[in-house]
Image: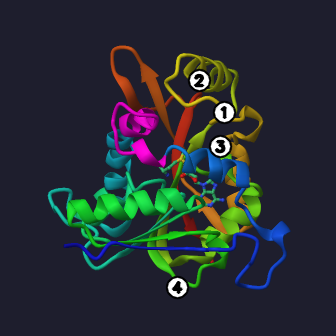
């Protein structure tokens, strides 16, 4: 039996730091949209199929990034042993579980209580010890983490600057942050928003193109909060290769960031 746990804010309008609602980064419509997908999140052919297809691609990036950052051995099966990891906007835990298998002590936080619950249930079934929390990241008293991941979330939050500041506050000195998000390009509007949603590859209403952020904008936001962003790596799609890491940033990209101070 695993120790996977979940806690949830019961009153979403109460900020535990006493802060005003305007300080929140969770959009209630986004939390409701993703919460409704929780029940089949782990079905590789279900509504989160695209995230399942993305997972091995971004995991290969994460694996390389942690080895580079901490000088790890690519052969090691537990390169995150002794390290803490926080995955913000974790959904039902598609990234948390592999991070735990790589040896990290993992916490996942999500806006939707349904996702935190589905994640905890799945981790328990897999015998993994992962802590899941539902709520606003800036209001969680969790301390700081060696690795902070936040994949495919920034395009859904209410205030990117505040959200990134909240993330940075949770990153330990010398820690590594990994972010991925769709780029705001004509290609992403046609393929990710109009095409993928029309074809049922992504649930309708998932993406709002105006909320996408370019690598340049993300780099500037990170610089403003005292973080340095790596060169972005594209996550591209071709019929022959499927989703893969690439120099082509038009659709989606992934970066690391570290504190400059
Ligand atoms: C596209 S899903 C990505 C899930 C997961 N990161 C993955 O890539 O497998 C976006 C997730 O972000 C969560 N989310 C949206 N806004 C958030 C916020 N302000 N704080 C925390 N989670 C948020 C949603 O509930 C949803 O589970």
Say which label, 2 or 4, has the lower sequence index.
Answer: 4
Q: For residue 193, what is the image quadrant?
A: top right
Foreground mark, 4 or 1, reads: 1
The residue singled out by tag 2 in the image is: 197
Q: Which residues are magenta?
A: 38-54
Q: Quick one: label 1, few (<14), some, or many (20+) residues within 10 Å? A: few
**Mark number, residue 215:** 3
Residue 37, image x, y percentages: 51, 43
Q: Residue at x 65, y 35 (%)?
A: 207
**Mark number, residue 143:** 4
* In this picture, residue 97 sits left or right of residue 223: left
Q: Is mark 1 within 8 Å of ligand 1?
A: no
Say which label, 1 or 3, has the lower sequence index.
Answer: 1
Q: Are marks 4 and 3 in contact (CB under 8 Å)?
A: no
Q: CA distance from mark 2 to mark 3?
A: 23 Å
Residue 222, image x, y percentages: 68, 60
Using the image, determine if residue 256 lies above or below residue 238.
Answer: below
Protein image colouring = rainbow
Q: Are marks 2 and 1 in contact (CB under 8 Å)?
A: yes
Q: Is mark 4 within 8 Å of ligand 1?
A: no
The residue singled out by tag 1 in the image is: 205
Secondary structure of the residue carrying tag 4 is loop
């Amino acid at each position: 039996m695993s120790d996977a746990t979940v806690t949830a804010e019961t009153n979403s309008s109460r900020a535990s730091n006493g802060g005003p609602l305007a300080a929140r980064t969770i959009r209630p419509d986004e939390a409701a949209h993703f919460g409704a997908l929780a029940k089949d999140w782990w079905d590789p052919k279900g509504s989160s199929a695209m995230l399942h297809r993305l997972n091995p691609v971004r995991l290969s990036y994460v694996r390389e990034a942690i080895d580079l950052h901490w000088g790890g051995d690519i052969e090691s099966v537990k390169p995150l042993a002794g390290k803490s990891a926080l995955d913000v906007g974790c959904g039902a835990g598609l990234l948390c579980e592999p991070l735990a298998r790589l040896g990290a002590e993992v916490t996942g936080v999500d806006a939707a209580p349904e996702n935190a619950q589905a994640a905890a249930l799945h981790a328990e079934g897999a015998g993994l010890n992962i802590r899941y929390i539902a709520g606003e990241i800036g209001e969680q008293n969790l301390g700081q983490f060696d690795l902070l991941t936040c994949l495919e979330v920034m395009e859904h939050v209410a205030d990117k600057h505040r959200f990134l500041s909240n993330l940075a506050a949770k990153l330990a000195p010398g820690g590594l942050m990994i972010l991925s998000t769709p780029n705001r390009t004509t290609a992403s509007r046609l393929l990710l928003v109009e095409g993928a949603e029309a074809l049922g590859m992504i649930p309708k209403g998932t993406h709002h193109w105006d909320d996408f952020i370019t690598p340049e904008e993300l780099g500037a936001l990170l610089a403003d909060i005292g973080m340095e962003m790596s060169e972005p790596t594209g996550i591209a799609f071709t019929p022959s290769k499927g989703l893969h890491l690439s120099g082509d940033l038009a659709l989606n990209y992934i970066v690391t960031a570290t504190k400059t101070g």
